[in-house]
Amino acid sequence: MLNIGVIISGRGSNLQALIDAGLNIVVVISDKADAFGLERAKKHKIDAVHIDPKKFKDKNTYELEIVKVLQKHQVGLVCLAGYMRIVGDVLLEHYQGKMLNIHPALLPAFPGLHSQKQALEHGVKVSGATVHFVDEGCDTGPIILQTAVPVLDNDTEETLSARILEQEHKIYPQAVKLFAEGKLKIVERRVTGTGG
């Protein structure tokens, strides 16, 4: 069975979706001590670990500590779920092709922060969510699954975010299951095996 490690920074609603899907999550790591996602992990008897980046001299030593924890738990897949940092060389070196992220937009449109606000400001009629492999860029890795969410005339950042989040909770577990079943293959920039 595939051991999954989840890295978070906040409330962990996507973490909860992964837990509810019955996936084998063995450790949850947060860069923030007060992240509610750590409480979610404890409630489900999953190891919850806070690693404070401020206690390390640089990003590499901080990420080495994360890798140590992941390796201790024999993690074969890392899921970023609201982790608010760009992954560096150390994590990538150890988990390239074995690290997924969920993003609240139809990538490559609106990468980075405040995607829903960007979508509204651009006046798009459709936004959505994307699960992708993590690479060295910001939300630039090969796309696994996407789902569209219509943008309504009266949408605010909050209402659009809430509807996109509902879809995130569906497609993230789906993508993780495809990975766990060994179905996903990256061919250049395309991910095959998604059934799409």
Image (spheres, rainbow, N blue to C red):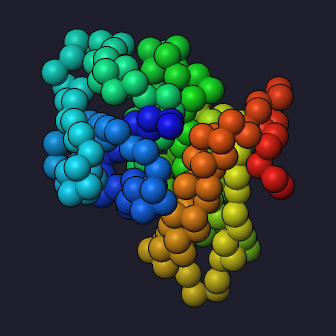
**Residue 174 location, x and y as percent?**
62, 55
Residue 140's x, y, as percent?
65, 36
Find residue 6 and report its horizontal and vertical position in percent.
39, 41
Q: Is residue 97 above or below residue 130?
A: above
Identity of the residue furthest to the bottom in this view: 154
Q: Is residue 129 left or right of residue 45?
A: right
Residue 80 in the image: state x and y as whole percent.
46, 41
Residue, x 66% and y 77% (percent of image)?
Answer: 151
Q: Toward which corner of the image does residue 46 lie, by quadrant?
A: top left
Q: Quadrant of residue 61?
A: top left
Q: In the image shown, does 106 or 193 lie closer to the viewer?
A: 193
- Displayed quadrant of residue 126: bottom right
Q: Residue at x 77, y 30 (%)?
A: 186
Name the residue at 58% across, 46% down: 176
Viewer-nearest residue: 1 or 118:
1
User: In this rendering, would 102 be left or right of 187?
Assistant: left
For the C terminus, which image quadrant? Answer: bottom right
**Of all residues shown, which one is farthest toward the front?**
1
Picture residue at 83% right of the left edge, 28% below the top: 187
